[in-house]
Image: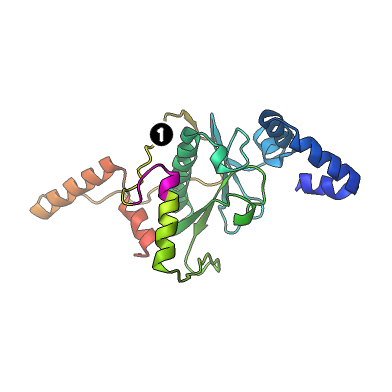
């Protein structure tokens, strides 16, 4: 990354002076400094070329130049945030709403059978970029990608202790469910030229017969469309071809 390359060229004395300077910066000054060093802020500003697939007033999505799979997208807030806790609730809710829409677009247009939506939040979690982002990776069977979470054994007393600590930090009792109100999302979307286009249906839907079965099927289809659910997409994700 640019910041890492710069530090490698500095002498130990210069690195120490830079660290001291950063320590004395206000949060606003530190954020502005990070923004100037951030390659993704330059992509968002249009100073670095990218393959943009979506943009609105606060979020942008581009294709990863080193994708894990074809259609691998990076979904980022336009404002510079290093980690998710810095983001306002409304921005957090909106970026995942965009991720949901792009995941659905990948299912339809790239013939994907599923997707991994991944956030590396912090260095210990594998975050390498200094700009918060969501990775959306379209998946197909036998694509040779593996995201396996190891399963470890932990005692019941330790589980209770962890649960209490987390519940207390959220201001609730351990016996009560944690309910976080969802932010209201109202964003004006602007879709740009994408690298993919939704496939047009080649065949017209068959006319339903005037029978009890046909009437039932028609009612079910109408109800499904109103709810925004696509049964073909669900079948893909669940592996029913």
**From where the camera sits, is residue 126 visible?**
no
Segment colored magenta: 167-174
Residues packed near mark 1 inside 10 Å, few (<14), some (14 to 19) or many (20 plus): few
Residue 217: in sight, yes or no? Answer: yes
Magenta stretch encompasses residue 168: yes
Q: Which colour scheme is used?
A: rainbow
Q: Residue furthest left?
A: 212
Residue 30 lies in the magenta stretch: no
Identify the element where label 1 is drawn: loop
Quarter of the figure that contains the C terminus: bottom left
- Toward which corner of the image does residue 80 lie, by quadrant? top right
Residue at 42 percent across and 43 percent down: it is 170
> Looking at this view, is 178 or 161 the one in front?
161
Vertical order, 181 against 150 (above or below): above
Q: Residue at x 62, y 56 (%)?
A: 124
Please identify the dominant SS of the magenta region: loop
Residue designated by label 1: 183
Across and down, in percent, residue 83 comes to: 59, 43
Which one is nearer the viewer's eye here, 44 or 118?
118
Residue 185 coordinates in the image, percent (x, y): 41, 32
| Residue 73 placement (x, y as % from top left) | 57, 48
Q: In this view, does 72 lie to the left or right of 210?
A: right
Q: Is residue 41 left or right of residue 210?
A: right
List x then y, in percent, for residue 166: 44, 50
User: How many callouts does the rendering have?
Assistant: 1
In screen coordinates, is 46 left or right of 108?
right
Residue drawn at x 32%, y 49% is 230
């Amino acid at each position: 990354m640019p910041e890492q390359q710069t530090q490698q060229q500095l002498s130990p004395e210069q690195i120490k002076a830079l660290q001291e300077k950063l320590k004395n910066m206000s949060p606003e000054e530190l954020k502005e400094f990070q923004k100037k060093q951030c390659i993704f802020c330059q992509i968002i500003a249009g100073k670095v070329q990218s393959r943009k697939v979506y943009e609105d007033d606060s979020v942008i999505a581009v294709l990863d130049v080193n994708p894990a799979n074809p259609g691998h997208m990076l979904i980022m807030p336009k404002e510079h945030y290093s980690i998710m806790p810095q983001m306002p609730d409304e921005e957090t809710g909106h970026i995942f709403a965009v991720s949901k829409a792009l995941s659905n677009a990948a299912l339809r247009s790239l013939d994907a059978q599923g997707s991994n939506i991944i956030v590396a939040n912090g260095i210990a979690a594998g975050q390498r970029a200094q700009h918060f982002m969501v990775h959306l990776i379209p998946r197909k069977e036998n694509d040779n990608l593996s995201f396996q979470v190891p399963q470890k054994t932990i005692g019941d007393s330790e589980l209770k202790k962890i649960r209490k600590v987390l519940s207390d930090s959220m201001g609730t009792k351990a016996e009560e469910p944690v309910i976080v109100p969802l932010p209201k999302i109202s964003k004006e979307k602007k879709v740009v030229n994408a690298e993919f286009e939704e496939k047009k249906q080649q065949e017209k839907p068959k006319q339903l017969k005037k029978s009890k079965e046909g009437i039932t099927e028609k009612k079910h289809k109408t109800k499904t469309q109103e709810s925004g659910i696509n049964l073909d997409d669900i079948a893909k994700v669940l592996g029913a071809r």
